[in-house]
């Protein structure tokens, strides 16, 4: 236990290093996030955004970088840094206390990732709602894409949502977000901690080198992304499924409010739209295939059973390649920077006198 105690960094170091690493990873992948949001939330039939590469180029050419691919980056930053700050603080606190009371280390890593993401969700979900709407909108008065939103800025978006939809609208999609992100975070950190332990045993020391740092970080995120892909498929299918206009016209008109985006399917003038909701969590990487079964349910478990029954195991893992790539890069950036900054803070500690204590 004494040896374990010596390796413990001050909580403030873990929080700052994690906050910087997590924010860097999110900002690096923000443009891909924007493209996936457009693909998921495009209300037009047929969709204007198809493949990842063609959609990326279309947004870049029409809207540019700052107000196109990087629209919504302000709320992304404002949510990512405090969110990862809370995450790493809670993760380290939970992990150390669980290990100290005798919980198996692997189980402690898994539980700590789950607890930490739950704590951080209170901060990152509202920022994700703002970010997602601004990403879907693009530039103000966008002549290339009509999303149904038209906010002048992050502050204007916040005020408008609270005024017109209520404060609770900032937490739309909270339950769906937790269903996918909590298992992902738990698995990601369980894999990462175990891989770090193996790497240190392999090299015979604490410093495993940049190559193994990158390998352990990217594989942990990639494996967690692959294992949670069925949850991603069902969540995306529920939040992006189309309600054909022909079917709607045969029934009495209804007004339905989506918990994911707050958009109403009340008829409006202009192009015909479908009742498609958008994701308010990390970008889903599956686009429903033409002819895929419509999940007439909001239950993730029911959706999983239905997809498996109608499309088999392949249907549950549709889009697993892009998801593995996204989670690998984001996780790799976050965790490698986390370790690099922790080592820098060992040399230049911010908290005098803490040294190697667990406080």
Image: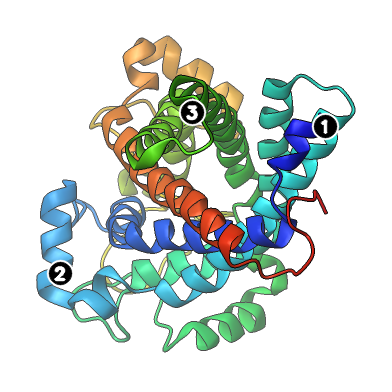
Q: Residue furthest right?
A: 101
Q: Residue at (19%, 54%) from the top-left corner?
A: 49
Name which residue lies at 43% across and 84% down.
151
Q: In the rendered image, which residue does mark 1 sit on?
A: 98
Q: CA distance from mark 3 to mark 2?
A: 30 Å
Percent coordinates x, y for residue 221 in the rendering: 44, 35
Nearer to me, 352 or 63? 352
Task: Decide if residue 230 is on the left or right side of residue 40.
Answer: right
Which residue is painted at 67% across and 70% down in the image?
A: 350
Residue 93, percent from left and from top: 78, 46
Task: Locate residue 331 relative to residue 179 in the image: left or right.
Answer: left
Residue 262 visible at all:
no
**Mark 3 = which residue?**
228
Quadrant of the rendering where the N terminus is positioned: top right
Kindly state the secondary structure of the residue where label 2 is placed: helix
Using the rendered view, name the quadrant where residue 64 is placed.
Answer: bottom left
Q: Residues within 10 Å of mark 3 (few under 14, many from 20)?
A: many
Foreground pick, 196 / 48: 196
């Amino acid at each position: 236990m004494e040896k374990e105690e010596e390796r413990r960094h001050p909580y403030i170091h873990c929080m700052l290093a994690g906050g910087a690493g997590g924010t860097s990873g999110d900002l690096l992948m923000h443009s891909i996030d924007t493209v996936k949001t457009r693909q998921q939330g495009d209300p037009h039939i047929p969709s204007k955004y198809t493949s990842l590469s063609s959609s990326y180029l279309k947004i870049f050419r029409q809207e540019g970088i700052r107000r196109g691919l990087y629209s919504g980056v302000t709320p992304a930053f404002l949510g990512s840094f405090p969110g990862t700050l809370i995450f790493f603080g809670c993760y380290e606190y939970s992990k150390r206390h669980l290990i100290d009371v005798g919980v198996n280390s692997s189980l402690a890593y898994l539980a700590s990732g789950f607890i930490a993401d739950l704590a951080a969700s209170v901060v990152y979900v509202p920022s994700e709602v703002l970010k997602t709407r601004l990403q879907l909108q693009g530039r103000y008065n966008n002549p290339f894409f009509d999303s149904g939103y038209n906010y002048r800025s992050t502050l204007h978006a916040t005020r408008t949502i609270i005024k017109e939809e209520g404060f609770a609208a900032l937490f739309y999609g909270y339950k769906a977000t937790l269903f996918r992100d909590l298992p992902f975070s738990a698995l990601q950190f369980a894999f990462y901690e175990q891989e770090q332990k193996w790497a240190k045993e392999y090299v015979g020391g604490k410093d495993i080198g940049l190559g193994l740092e990158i390998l352990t970080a990217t594989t942990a995120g990639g494996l967690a992304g692959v294992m949670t892909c069925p949850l991603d498929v069902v969540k995306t299918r529920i939040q992006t499924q189309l309600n054909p206009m022909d079917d709607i016209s045969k029934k009495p008109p209804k007004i339905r409010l989506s918990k994911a985006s707050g958009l109403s399917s009340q008829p409006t003038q202009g192009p015909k739209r479908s009742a498609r909701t958008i994701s308010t969590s990390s970008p889903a990487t599956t686009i429903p295939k033409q002819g895929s079964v419509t999940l007439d349910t909001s239950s993730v478990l029911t959706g999983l059973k239905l997809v498996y029954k109608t499309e088999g195991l392949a249907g549950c893992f549709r889009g697993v390649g892009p998801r593995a790539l996204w989670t690998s890069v984001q996780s790799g950036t976050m965790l490698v920077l986390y370790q690099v900054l922790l080592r820098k803070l060992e040399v230049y500690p911010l908290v005098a006198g803490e040294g190697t204590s667990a406080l």
